[in-house]
Image (cartoon, rainbow, N blue to C red):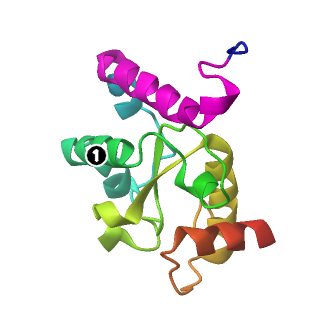
Amino acid sequence: MVEYPNHYCRRHFEHEAEYLASRQKWARSRDQHYQRKYNTVTRNRSEHKSEQYNFYRSRQWARLRRNVLERDNYLCKYCAAINIVTPAKTVDHIRPVEAFPEYKSDIDNLAVICYSCHRAKTDWEQAYYGTGQGNKLTGAKPIDNINQVVRQMKKA
């Protein structure tokens, strides 16, 4: 028997996250309003950051984002690194754009991330790379492996 609110029984529960992700993907593909809303988010603007923010309003970013979400099945890669399955809809740069602008459109530098991991990763990036408003870049060596990033985030 299936227990509410799940969609699968205990024997087949491993399919639950995949089902939820496919439902989310279907809903997003039909929701053009969501995409327009996503592209019009107002961020803290400055002359220095205007090019960086304009990238997130481009067709190139919209295509990259959609491809990454589909590639990662709408599941957080950072949670997956610690064997947790979490549906997510945010696409994150593994190497932050502020520190490594040349990697902003590299699909291998992108991963799906849930809200809680994104919050923790942003805090870690501010300490490790020196990104964020009012901080100075540290020139730290980039970390490309999500498993290593997760270990570093746990230490912080």
Residue depicted at x 30% and y 60%: 107
Q: Position of residue 146 (x, y in %)?
A: 54, 68
For the stretch drawn in magenta, the main secondary structure is: helix
SS type, badge 1: helix
Quadrant (top left, top right, bottom left, bottom right) of the N terminus:
top right
Q: Is residue 133 above or below residue 63?
A: below
Residue depicted at x 44% and y 33%: 41
Quadrant (top left, top right, bottom left, bottom right) of the C terminus:
bottom right
Quarter of the image for residue 108 reads bottom left
Query: Is there any visible trace of residue 68 in the rendered image?
Result: yes
Query: Is there any visible trace of residue 130 in the rendered image?
Result: no
Q: Image check: 117 left or right of 95?
A: right
Q: Image check: 80 left or right of 60?
A: right
Mark 1 is surrounded, within 10 Å at the Cα level, by few (under 14), some (14 to 19) or many (20 or more) other residues, namely some
Which residue in the structure is indicated by mark 1? 67
Of all residues, the one furthest to the left in this rendering is 59
Hey, what amino acid is under mark 1? Asn
Q: Is residue 137 above or below residue 66?
A: below
Q: Image check: 122 left or right of 18?
A: right
Quarter of the image for residue 140 reads bottom right
Task: Judge whether residue 14 is colored magenta.
Answer: yes
Of all residues, the one furthest to the right in this rendering is 155
Q: Which residues are magenta?
A: 6-33
Task: Judge whether residue 52 is colored magenta.
Answer: no
Q: Is residue 127 above or below residue 44?
A: below
Q: Nearer the viewer, residue 88 or 38?
A: 88
Q: Nearer the viewer, residue 132 or 116?
A: 116
Q: Nearer the viewer, residue 61 or 46?
A: 61
Residue depicted at x 63% and y 52%: 79
Q: Image check: 29 left or right of 125?
A: left
Q: Position of residue 122 (x, y in %)?
A: 63, 58
Q: Position of residue 66 (x, y in %)?
A: 30, 40
